[in-house]
Image (cartoon, grey):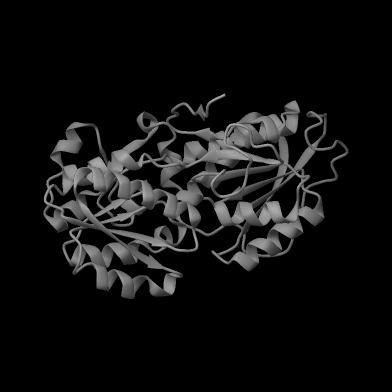
Amino acid sequence: MGHMNISRRNFAAGLAGTFALGALGIAGCSGEDNTDAAGSGAAAGTTYKIGVLQLTQHAALDAANEGFIAALDDSGISYDADQQNASNDQNACQTIAQTFANDGCDLILAIGTPAAQAVLGATTDIPVIGTAITDFAASGLVDSNDAPGGNLTGTSDMNPVADQMKLLEELVPDAQNVGLLFCTSESNSEIQVSMAEKELDAAGIGHERYTVSSSNEIQSVVEAMVSQVDAIYAPTDNTISAAMAQVASIANAAGVPTICGEVGEVEAGGLASVSINYYELGYSAGEMAVQILTEDADPAEMPIVTMSADECDLVYNQETADELGIDVSAIVEQGAEDVSA
């Protein structure tokens, strides 16, 4: 069986909003006692206990979180969701994950690869839905993306990297050297960068990796790279996404456009993207969660859900384009949406 594709839904309002996240704490899942085991079917009066572990706070992950909650609400089930944000701290991820496991949650949502890795380290019994994860199999989360084989499944934000590189060529046709900016601690970022390198090689465009190990290094790395590259590519990297306003401020001032992995990075000052709709991604994760909780669906047999390129959103930032002096009329004619403030 191949990967499942999720259909487009019109949830633009969800992209604009950010979900109110709980402060980091060790409260555990706070729902009522659930007399039915997870996956045993919805029973009258059942309130499901759901732990939500979000790696860090930025627009894409917030939108996925919001979409997940909306799907639960639309399903009509009764639930208590314990929202926890690890502030991009792996130790915090592990502590929160262990608390959810000890507290006996009916299901756990892990937003971001490090969050999912922490949850899998804490439980092999509680059903886990992962979202905003590029490649579940390559990250060691599942046996395969078609047949996960364990207690975790979910929705993938694998980017249409080839389309993003075509977008770069269209908007920056004279680019001879592209800087690939990402955090070394995120395995999924390197997957996307390797894909970008393949596309750039095919187009005869030079490229160089610029990496950070933490957000503390972003300013110095970006300040160094802008004098050496004609454009920047920033994949869906949580560390870079959370600091995109800083990246864009430095790059735009230097006249270097940034092609982004997702819409939140464009909203923060990047130039353009062919972007996953993270609200839809989270909504689809929520639908999977409902199937597990109420229909006895088995995560081991639920293929990872992906989005196709034609289900993604072509977006640009007009304010950034004006600052850089880049003509975006060609992609506007293709239906691109301006997401500038």
Quarter of the rendering containing residue 72: top right
Asked if 105 appears above or below 11 in the picture, the reply is below
The percent position of residue 208, horizontal first and vertical second, equals 28, 61
Residue 316 seen:
no
Q: Is residue 90 left or right of residue 196?
A: right
Classify the position of the N terminus by image quarter. Answer: top right
The percent position of residue 297, horizontal first and vertical second, equals 72, 29
Asked if 127 appears above or below 40 in the picture, the reply is below
Residue farthest top in this picture: 1
Q: Is residue 246 left or right of residue 91?
A: left
Q: Is residue 202 left or right of residue 107?
A: left
Q: Is residue 229 left or right of residue 31?
A: left
| In the foreground, 28 or 193 | 193
Residue farthest right in this picture: 35
| In the foreground, 230 or 130 | 230
Residue at 24%, 32% (x, y): give it: 335
Residue at 78%, 39% (x, y): give it: 47
The percent position of residue 116, horizontal first and vertical second, equals 62, 51
Residue 289 seen:
yes
The percent position of residue 79, horizontal first and vertical second, equals 72, 41
